[in-house]
Amino acid sequence: MFRLETVASDGIRSVALHGPARMRSVRPILPFLLSLFSCATVQPQWWKVQTSGIDSNLRGISVAEMPDAKGVPVPVVWASGSNGAILKSVDEGKTWKRLRVNGGDALDFRGIVAFSEKVAYLMSSGEGEESRIYRTTDGGETWKLQYTDKRKEFFLDAMACLSETHCFALSDPIDGKFLLLNTTDGEDWNPLPRENMPAALPGEGAFAASNTCLAISGEEIFFGTGGPAARVFHSLDSGRTWTDAETPIVSGKASAGIFSLTIGDDNRIMAVGGDYKEPSRPYRVAAHSVDGGKTWQLAAQQPGGYRSAVANIDDGRWVAVGPSGEDLTDDSGAHWKHTDSLNLNAVALLDVFTGWAVGPNGTIARFVNHTTHEIRFRRPHSRQKPVAADVAD
């Protein structure tokens, strides 16, 4: 008689046989053993830390492209955060250069949108004049202050751009309604009319957690809120008229609501959030809409806790990041699976194989796509494997 038991070794379970029938029993059970081994897998990591240890809570991340010496497009990565931190890498994250805004060392740069190695917009968050919009055209050597506001209620939450000259920025409510700024020339910012925008609820606001509570596509604008309700505001005509829709994402507290919105294909929109004061609680964290934001459904299997940002990888696949880890869905948000346990705030993907995320203590991590089959959207240029990065002042 023999006994079959599993033995843990380095995280992978193996099989051991014991008893007098050990030798003669090996041949009949080989197919069974092989089937067990084929099922033994190690969970792949989708994020690889490239650098950390900087005195900043990074919340802004943007990836653009520039041509290399042979004219092949390669990524340029910009990151930003507290204590005036601005970082840029032109070698896929192997090294990072620290940039500075004159007089901005105390600012909290929660949003950055880059278009090339030279051109980027930068947004700081805070009450009144602590909320600012800057722009550089020389790679971050100098920054021009483009907009700020002295009113205490002015608090910038997110910034998004359609082009190098056409951008939007969202502020918390002023005089009972959310404020949206707009530039169409890349220089001058002006408030959009608010006559047709629904009023904000008492205590309702947006979250400046990852620069992704605002999403735009063509003339469509979406932004998510939190506090007394987790609503999505939607304009089909660049902000001239608005509708709003309640979502099932958790709300009812100042710390809860929608933290990130991303627009996908086929009228699908993904929203993630939760309660940042309960970061490990997977309760009503993710929802999706298949009709352009009119109605919303909770994910049947939720991410592992509060998530501050979500990004679209490709058709049906999305990634969410947060303080308690990362999750992936391959069925358009119906079911989420935990992949990593890094503390990350924000994520930006250039394509299905190229992306970065940022978090506390200056953490910057690169996206590692474990897809084994070729995807039609894959860019033709090759990618080098990431290595440990240096930060230079």
Image (cartoon, rainbow, N blue to C red):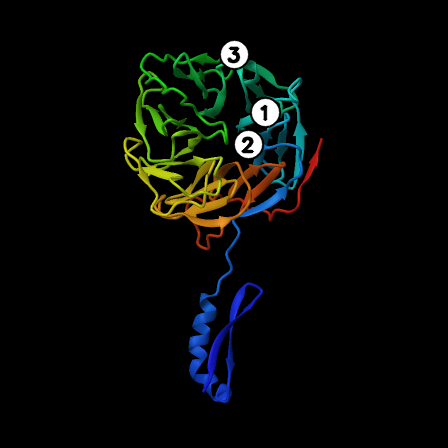
Q: Is residue 73 left or right of 202 when viewed as pictured?
A: right
- Amino acid type at image mark 2: Arg
Q: CA distance from mark 2 to mark 1?
A: 9 Å
Q: Which residue is mark 1?
A: 108
- Asked if the residue under mark 1 is in contact with the one under mark 2, i.e. CB atoms within 8 Å, the reply is yes
Q: N-terminal of the two: label 2 or label 1?
A: 2
Position of the C terminus, as image quadrant, is top right
Q: As displayed, is residue 89 above or below residue 386?
A: above
Q: Name the residue: 63% across, 37% down.
A: 361
Residue type of the residue flagged with mark 1: Asp
Q: Position of residue 81 (x, y in %)?
A: 59, 29
Estimate the spatial distance between the alpha carbons at disc 1 and disc 3, rounded to whole Å: 16 Å
Q: Contact (CB < 8 A) between labels 3 and 2?
A: no
Q: Which residue is mark 2?
A: 59
What x and y, as percent, mark residue 63?
53, 34
Specify few, some or many for label 3: CA neighbours under 10 Å numbering under 14, 14-19, or 20 or more.
some
Disc 3 target residue? 149
Residue plotted at (48% across, 65% down): 40
